Amino acid sequence: MLVACVALVAALAGCSTGSDAVATGGTFEFVSPGGKTAIFYDPPAARGTIGALSGPDLLSEGKTVSVADFPDKVVVVNLWGQWCGPCRAEAPALEKVYEATKDKGVAFLGINVRDPQRDKAQDFVTDNKVGYPSIYDPSMRTLLALGGNFPTSVIPTTLVLDRQHRVAAVYLRSLIAEDLQPIVEKLAEEGKQ
């Protein structure tokens, strides 16, 4: 309950300032400029980082999955719930972009939230043929790694992290492949070694 209240206060405070997100001291501080639902951070020096994001793997009990499992990769982090209509709508688009970019140094990581029944969330992954891992987090505790710096009450939300795991884009809405794939491919090329 406390996390939900903090997220709501952060969301309201962010939307009321009208300024953009800023990175200070390597920390990502979210402010939703003018109620935008797609925010981009360029140049790379303007990007802030998230904390250590990890949690229980949705499909494999006893296993943990983390952003750190994907060093030097662009990481697309998607917050979703099987109860969420827009999440169901965007699942095929996310899978399409995942399949198109996974060989280009891109990883996807879902975070399943507010699903008290693990089996229902697992069914969602199976039914939608989702090929990337998800953290199972019904209480949304893993989102503390985001530092309360963006509204975690918006589901679905997608963060796109560059190869240094700095936040390059935030989407506070359901996505289609044509929205997501260009930014993911650009970031994959940007940090290519």
Image (cartoon, grey):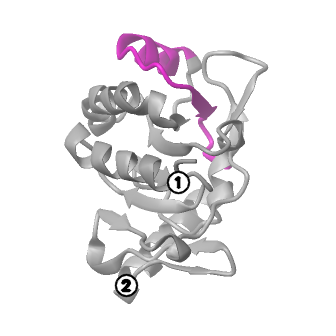
Question: Which is more N-terminal, label 2 or label 1?
Answer: 2
Q: Position of residue 119 (x, y in %)?
A: 54, 14
Q: CA distance from mark 1 to mark 2?
A: 34 Å
Cβ atoms under marks 1 and 2 closer than 8 Å: no
The quadrant where residue 5 appears: bottom right
State yes or no: residue 185 in magenta. Answer: no
Q: On residue 38, which mark appears?
A: none
User: 125 or 138: which is nearer to us?
Assistant: 125
**Residue bearing mark 1:** 191
Q: Is residue 17 placed above or below 89 in the rendered structure?
A: below
Q: Is residue 97 left or right of residue 25?
A: left
Task: Assign a secondary structure to mark 2.
Answer: helix
Residue at the spot 37% in from the left edge and 67% down from the top edge: 40
Judged by depth in the image, the label closer to the viewer, 1 or 2, is 1
Residue at x 53%, y 70% (from the top left corner) = 47
Q: Say which residue appears at 34% left-offset and 28% top-offset.
A: 100
Region of the chain picked out in magenta, as a range:
119-141
Q: Tell me: residue 99, above or below residue 97.
A: above
Q: Secondary structure at mark 1?
A: loop
Magenta stretch: includes residue 131: yes
Q: Amino acid at mark 2?
A: Ser
Q: Residues within 10 Å of mark 1 (few under 14, many from 20)?
A: some
Residue 80, percent from left and from top? 44, 38
Q: How many marks?
A: 2
Residue 121, placed above or below residue 190:
above
Is residue 161 visible in the rendered image? The answer is yes
Label placed on residue 16:
2
Task: Identify residue type, mark 1.
Answer: Gly
Percent of width and height locating residue 153: 46, 55
